Image (tube, rainbow, N blue to C red):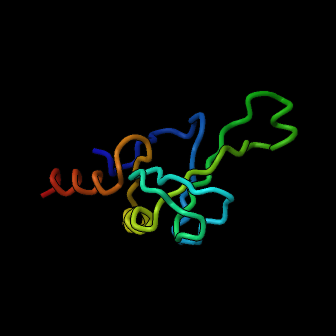
Amino acid sequence: MSLSCPFDGDEFEWWWEFETDTKPLATKRARKCRSCGARIAVGDQCGKVSRHRNPGNEIEERIYGDEVPMPSWWLCETCTDLAAAVHEMGMCFELDGKSIKDQIAQYRRETT
């Protein structure tokens, strides 16, 4: 099931943090929603997904510490609202391949 926590340990190569509040996209170019693929224009309300990974060597560790930043992902306003609702329920969602809306629909089919 996609709406669950896939991590069963503390060790993984990279991770992401979802900011549940929507804010205007403040980048120089438009972005694509990581969940549904919709275009997010500069100034549109969206959610940010900050990504990090473990340092690959001593130099990265000296520069960045324990978390090396990776490029952020963005969610359109609709997907941010859905993701925030799922997050408030204490559940996890995936951001690689299947939209949050489809994950919720799958969860509803499997639990009802």
Measuring from the top left, give residue 7's x and y in whole percent. Answer: 46, 41
- Judging depth in this view, the residue of 14 and 75 nearest the camera is 75
**Residue at x 30% of width, y 57% of height:** 101
Query: Is 110 displayed left or right of 16 in the figure?
Result: left
Residue furthest to the top in view is 57
User: Can you give x and y, in whole percent of width and height, for residue 75 in the image?
Assistant: 49, 58
When the figure is inspected, residue 17 is found, relative to residue 12, above or below; the finding is below
Q: Quadrant of residue 13?
A: top right
The quadrant in which residue 88 appears is bottom left
Residue at x-position 59% and y-position 70%: 43
Say which quadrant the C terminus sits in: bottom left
Residue 72: percent from left, percent from top? 62, 51
Residue 8 horizontal/vertical position (percent): 45, 40
In this rendering, would 54 be left or right of 13?
A: right
Furthest residue in direction left, as rendered: 112
Q: On the rendered image, what quadrant is the N terminus found in?
A: top left
Question: Is residue 8 toward the left or the right of residue 13 in the image?
Answer: left
